[in-house]
Each structure stands twice: as C-alpha cells, then as structure tokens.
Amino acid sequence: MVQLLENDIRTRDVLDWKGVHLFHFQGSSCSQKTRIVLNLKRVEWTSYHIELPKSENLNERYLGINPRGLVPTLVIDGEVHIESNDIVSLLDARFPEPRLIPEGREAEMADLLRHEDDLHLDLRTISFRFTQPRGRAPKSEEVLADYRAGGSGTVLGKPDPNKAVEIDFWQRIARDGITDEAVRVSAGRFRESFDDLDRRLGSAPYIMGERLSMADIAWFIYVNRLVRCGYPVERLHPNLFAWFAPLRARPDFAREVEVSPEIQRAVEENHRRQREAGQTLVDVAGL
Ligand SMILES: N[C@@H](CCC(=O)N[C@@H](CS)C(=O)NCC(=O)O)C(=O)O
C-alpha cells in the first residue's frame, strides 16, 4: 500500500480534508478503473479533475500532493494514497460492499493487478500512437524541469525512482517518437497477456471465476483502450471479446471510459491516415 507519509506531502491542506476525494483525469486508464470501483461501491466522493494534456499533474500544488505527479490520487480522511491498484484495494477494504477482491484469493489478485500495472507504459506507448495525435513532445523541457524540481521527490520517505522513469519516457518519445519497434514490443506483451485471459475466460464468465472482481475492472480498462487503438480483440481472443462486450455495454462502465466527440473525431482521422499509409496497429505490430 502506498499511503504517503506527512513528509512526502508539501500541499499540507489536504491532510485536514474529511471524506473521500479523488484527483483524476477523464481519459486516464488508472482513473477510469478507480471511478468504476467507486461507482460500484456507491461511495460519495469529491472530484478534482486534473487536465493531463495541460500538465496540471506537474504543477507545484499537485506535486505537493502526489510527488510522483501521476493520477489518480485518493485523499480519504486526510490520508493520501497513490498507485491505482493500492487505491482500489484500499477502497475494497474500507467499503466492502460489493466485495471485489474475493476472500482468501488476495495473493492471486495482487499478481493479476501487478501484471496489469507492469504493462502501464506499454499501454501509454500504444495509446500515444493509435488514439488522438499528441504532437512530438507532449511535455516540453520546461515542464519536465518543473517536474524534476517540484514536490518532495520522496515516496514513503525515500527518493522516488519512478519519477526518473517517467521523465525518461517523455524525453525518449520527444527524441524518437513512438517507434515501430516499441509498438511491436508493447503489442506483443498485450497479446501474451490477452491469450492468458482468453484461456481463463474459456471456462468461466469472469477472470477469477463466477463473479465480477477487481481483476475484471482493471483488465476491462486495458482491453477497452486497445480496442480503441484498433487491436483486433474479437479476432485474436474470442473469449476475451465475449467477456468484454457486455461489460462495455453497462452504463456504469461505459460512462467512465467515454471520450468527447472532438477526441473521437481526432482518433478516427488518425486511423484514416494510418489506414491509407498501411500504418495501423495491426500493420505495425503484425497482428
Ligand atoms: N502505476 C500508476 C500509474 C499512474 C499513471 O501513469 N497515470 C497516468 C494516467 S493513466 C498519468 O498520470 N500520466 C501522466 C501524464 O500523462 O502526464 C497507477 O497505477 O496509479
């Protein structure tokens, strides 16, 4: 669990906040997952929308709350929690109805969620090339300098290595773009994971068996994003698609993954150009 220590936090007023507060962004996969969990549990929460395209996550105030500069962040009765999988696990413990982590299967769930988190930069790699174009350098050197300098720079009292990984990602894509090779590697990792899920879903309606669990919510978000990028889930993983389609039709899931009409148009225009150039996700990754 990543509950920040008081010394990690520079924006001190949040330590006095009562109730449940979520810093999130509509289009962020980890935020979408967290909001679906809050919806299912009917938790009342206060929303703070952080515009990632405007780098609001890297300003002094937000870095003072989450030194890692990522969304989501949960503030609950003055406790500050980061890392979406830790946040949803905490929500399951504090608001147990309905239970989304089956009792006695916590370790198995932790493995499934860790694996999902390990693919986060792969998701970003594919999203940045196959959803709406974000320009060559989504974070300028100036913004990255503020990021480097802002906040305490510590998580649980120790210098946070994740920040350097993030800065490296932004500098790499500004330098090289999202290369074909990076797409092939990331898509290959998803294909392997989706094959595993497809096998599980061949013998049960949900990833962990008979009931919807946190694993379904977490992987739903990834499958949804990959489908939007043009990954052929139905053709390559039919059981996974049969599981995904009814979840995608549920209003409490659909609402959280909705995109604005302008973004949808930009994605479609990007796909049209990619089809003309023989550069779709299927073409580049050889799916
Ligand atoms: N492991 C983290 C990953 C969080 C993460 O990378 N969030 C993304 C949005 S999905 C973000 O904040 N990106 C920063 C940006 O795009 O500037 C978690 O699960 O919370």
Image (tube, rainbow, N blue to C red):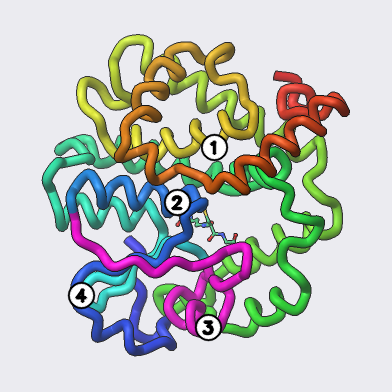
What stretch of residues is rendered in magenta? 43-69
> Badge 1: few (under 14), some or many (20 or more) residues near its Cα, within 10 Å?
many
Residue 280 vs 116, above or below: the answer is: above
Residue 225: numbered disc: 1
> Badge 2: few (under 14), some or many (20 or more) residues near its Cα, within 10 Å?
many
Label 4 SS: loop
Residue under label 4:
77
| Residue drawn 63% across the image and 84% down it | 149
Residue under label 3:
151
Looking at marks 4 and 1 on the same chain, the residue that comes earlier in the sequence is marked by 4
Q: CA distance from mark 2 to mark 4?
A: 21 Å
| Residue drawn 78% across the image and 74% down it | 141
Quadrant of the frame with the C terminus: top right
Looking at marks 3 and 4 on the same chain, the residue that comes earlier in the sequence is marked by 4
Quadrant of the frame with the N terminus: bottom left
Label 1 SS: helix
Q: What amino acid does circle 4 point to? A: Asp
Q: Which corner quadrant of the image does residue 257 belong to? A: top left
Camera-side mark, 2 or 1? 1
